[in-house]
Amino acid sequence: MSALGHLSTPATVEPAPPPEGSERRRTAYLLLLPGGLWLILFFVVPLVSLIAASLYDPNGSIESGFSMTWSFHNYVDALADYARPFGRSLWYSLLTTAFCLLLGFPLAYAIAFKAGRWKNLMLALVIAPFFTSFLIRTLSWKLLLSDNGFVVDALKAVHILGSDGRLLATTAAVVTGLTYNFLPFMVLPLYASLEKIDHRLIEAGGDLYASAFTTFRTVTFPLAMPGVVAGTLLTFIPAAGDYINAQLLGTPKQRMIGNDIQRLFAAGAYPTAAALSVTLMAAITVLVLFYVRRAGTEDLV
């Protein structure tokens, strides 16, 4: 009897623990949720809206509204009308990136290898301009490069500039302002890459009787390539879309594509402005992908 009673009682079965892999995936999805929602709301939705606006009827207006006519010719018309400022923006961005690299690499090298106990102070000085607004920094260059400023007077004194020469409202002023404003974006990733280099590798070059230049060319610079790639991208991309420097330090002859996009949006020409914006983003994306592929590194920092 006791044996039958024992058989009729159902055995208590412990629930199987969830697989460890599914728990990890659920945790990963929860961690990605805030960032994903942020990207959807503030990147995907505006981007889709911008692309849609670029295909609106160009004959519409803010008062009468814009209708979706899938006007792909907006892109052709925008490029035909604004090819020169578009190319000028890319040219200025390339010059700015080159100058930032030439100035930033020695500075980052000095901070990483030579600064010693002054390293933190020098890093603080590099990021110090960020404590002032972008507009104020650019306006300060307008004062420095003015016709009555000490920079123009000094260049005239050493006969680099003629008696009627000027710096403000020139291409040099715009590129100088861009270089100054985006230099920290080059220095910081370069410093991050240089600081990680094992000094014993550089010393090994000297032990093998390589010159300082050969050691730099074959050891230091290749190991710093992730920083070079990251710095050039962080400098080129925002410089291509900048319009403050051309607005304050240049003339209409130096206007960049950002100036035209800002003016068109302000005038209510949304389809043309949106077409230019999408074209600029596409051009930068293609150039960046080509550059990263040619650089041969995906580990940017």
Image: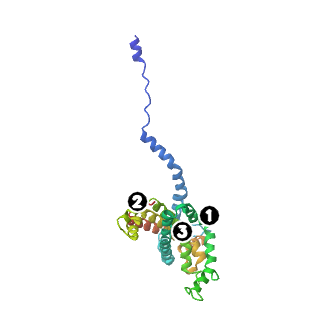
* N-term mark: 3 or 2: 3
301 to the left or right of 184:
left
Residue located farthest toward the left when viewing the structure as drawn: 208
| Amino acid type of the residue tagged 1 in the rendering | Phe
The residue carrying mark 3 is 182
Residue 60 location, x and y as percent?
Answer: 57, 70
Residue 283 location, x and y as percent?
Answer: 45, 69
Numbered label attached to residue 200: 2
* Nearer to the camera, 97 or 2: 97
Q: Residue at x 55, y 62 (%)?
A: 118
Query: Label 2: few (<14), some or many (≥20) within 10 Å?
Result: few
- Image quarter of residue 147: bottom right
- Image quarter of residue 287: bottom left
Query: Label 3: few (<14), some or many (≥20) within 10 Å?
Result: some
Q: Residue at x 45, y 44 (%)?
A: 25
| Amino acid type of the residue tagged 3 in the rendering | Phe
* Nearer to the camera, 289 or 272: 289
Q: Secondary structure at mark 3?
A: helix
Q: Secondary structure at mark 2?
A: helix
Q: Secondary structure at mark 1?
A: helix
Q: Residue at x 58, y 65 (%)?
A: 125
Determine the CA span between mark 3 and mark 1: 14 Å
| Amino acid type of the residue tagged 2 in the rendering | Arg
Q: Quadrant of the N terminus?
A: top left
Residue 94 location, x and y as percent?
Answer: 47, 73
Determine the CA span between mark 3 and mark 2: 32 Å
* N-term mark: 3 or 1: 1
The residue carrying mark 1 is 131
**Residue 245 shows up from this direction:** yes
